[in-house]
Image: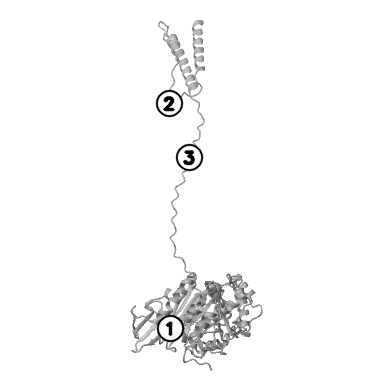
Amino acid sequence: MANFFGNKFRALREIGNSITLLPTRAPTQPNNSCTLNQNDRRLREDKFSAPGRERNSTQSLFRCWTGVFNIRRWFTTLKPKEEPEEEPEEEPEEEPEEEPEEEPEEEPEEEPEEEPRDDPAYRLNIVSYNINGKKDLQEVVNRLQRQKSEDDPHVIFLQETCIGKGGTIALSDWNAYYTTYSDNGKGAAILVKKDGKMKFKYFSQEVDENGRYVVLRCSLKGQDFTFVCVYNHKDDTSTLELLSPYLEKVTLGALVIGGDFNTTLRQSDRAKGDKGNLTNYPGSQRNPQHQKIRPLVEQLMDRHDLFDVFAECDAPGGSKHTFSTKNRNREQIVSRLDYFFMPKECQGLFKKCTVLDDVANKDHRPLFLELKTKDGTDEEVTAAMQALELGTAEGPGRDNQKISGVEIVAAIHTLELNKVQRPDGALEYSHLNDETVDQLKRELNEIINTSSLPENFANDKYLILAQILAQRLENWGSTLSRKKRRNSQTSERRQSSQQQTEELETVDSAMEAEWSDLDFCVKKKLADHPSLESCKILGNMLPRNESTGGKILHKGCPLTPILCELLQEYESDPHSSKN
């Protein structure tokens, strides 16, 4: 019995030892199954299954109980420890793919509300009108204002005003800037409406003594402008060339050129036929007058990068012609002779350009231009102009200066092109500005008014004044010299004139002429001109030969070529006589 229990306890001990050797963690087999080790198998074979071993019910029960106990303990021991379940890493929630935002349907841009048609801060109306010498300017203005109320003009360019020396424009509701030339022809004027809403500030004006142009620099409705009103006579080929250097050097703000240019620019600008049934002139039928002036207009446009405003907004169905007359066959002839020109950089300023009706005028019709303006002034420019003290808030109605800034700038430009130099060096006016031009204008007009040269008159100012007078003698007054050259009756006279010219050009230093001869030729050339007195200074400008008393014409002086030409042509004219 003791041996029996000893064997049992030994078996139990071995089982316990074997059990303690079992792993405390779950096996790595995927099915978690466990197998008995060798000791367990030996124990089972040797102790329980040995042959001849007595097997009674008590032993069987004990073995059964022990086996159950051991198996239970064994399985309890072998049961893998439940490891705390590792919380699965939360996979980042897949952000739902952002559906491409549907671009909101582009709502049509709301057009800015149109400013009221009469709002002075945004709208400027300009009219250009050849009035053909009508004397009642108040009636002209009233007719223009009887158009649509929204088209009432704020600025008016007038041509062929025909205001003689001493004449005036007296309009109570308008500031007037105008030429005084002759009662019988030419003339230009710019009228600016007197209205507090206009915010008008006057800076300067340039008025032509020959009745061809008025230049007004001012500020209106917050925008700086250079207004140029032009009357280009049908025989005039010098005005546009004269204006060009000034506009290049001294233009202020937006440039607006308007007036009667006496030429067409396109084939469609000229037509003929019965009223309501007009056909354009064929290209073969050319107008000599238009052919002569058209290149000058095109040159002005190219030089200043200008565009024809009416052509830019020419709408089908509207009237395209500003001038009407009849030919010998009583056919109606219509042309577009009146224009507005602006720099291409100012295209954003204009809104429309149309031809207005005016039954009271038989030849020309008004040309209407509407501009957009800004509310606010260019403080820098305005302050600079006011510092020069060029005029008052409204400005003088008439500039009585006999020499204009346009002539001064053109003279300097010509001298530079011809590379004319002073005896002691080049001209000092390569960089012109408002102050320089205004100072020269005051000094040269003082000389013209007194007809005497100051003792310290600098050589450069002498050359500028001489060039201005030479331009006047060439372009003012009679055209006899041109007619004479065309109508020379004999080749002998032409050869003689050519020979004299060549002799003059080969003179090394100077030639002499009697002042009485020169004075006669000048008066003959400018006989009908109202500003003849402005050339009295010539007698003092030409140096005198003390020994002979004659006037010396220096080679290189701007006056010498034109005075020599006048001497040749008028001295040989049988219809000329010295009284």
* Quarter of image, res 334: bottom left
Q: Which of marks 2 and 3 precedes in the sequence?
A: 2
Q: CA distance from mark 2 to mark 1?
A: 131 Å
Q: CA distance from mark 3 to mark 1?
A: 110 Å
Q: Which of 181 and 130 lies nearest the eye of the viewer?
A: 181
Most extreme residue toward the right is 455
Q: Amino acid at mark 2?
A: Pro
Residue corresponding to mark 1 = 494
Of circles 3 and 1, the one toward us is 1
The three-letter code of the residue at mark 1 reads Arg
Q: Which residue is mark 3?
A: 91
| Front label number (3 vs 2) | 3
Judge left or right: residue 277 versus residue 569.
left
Whole-percent x, y for residue 233 in the image: 46, 83
Residue that carries the numbered disc 2 in the rendered image: 30
Q: From the viewer's perspective, tell me whether residue 545 is left or right of residue 129.
A: right
Within 10 Å of the Cα at label 2, are there few (<14), some (14-19), or many (20+) other Cα atoms?
Answer: few
Mark closer to the chain start, 2 or 1 = 2
Q: Amino acid at mark 3?
A: Glu
Q: Which mark is residue 175?
A: none
Query: Dot 3: within a 10 Å radius of its alpha carbon, few (fewer than 14), some, or many (20 or more) residues?
Result: few
Q: Does the image show residue 543?
A: yes
* Residue 159 locus on image (x, y percent): 49, 84
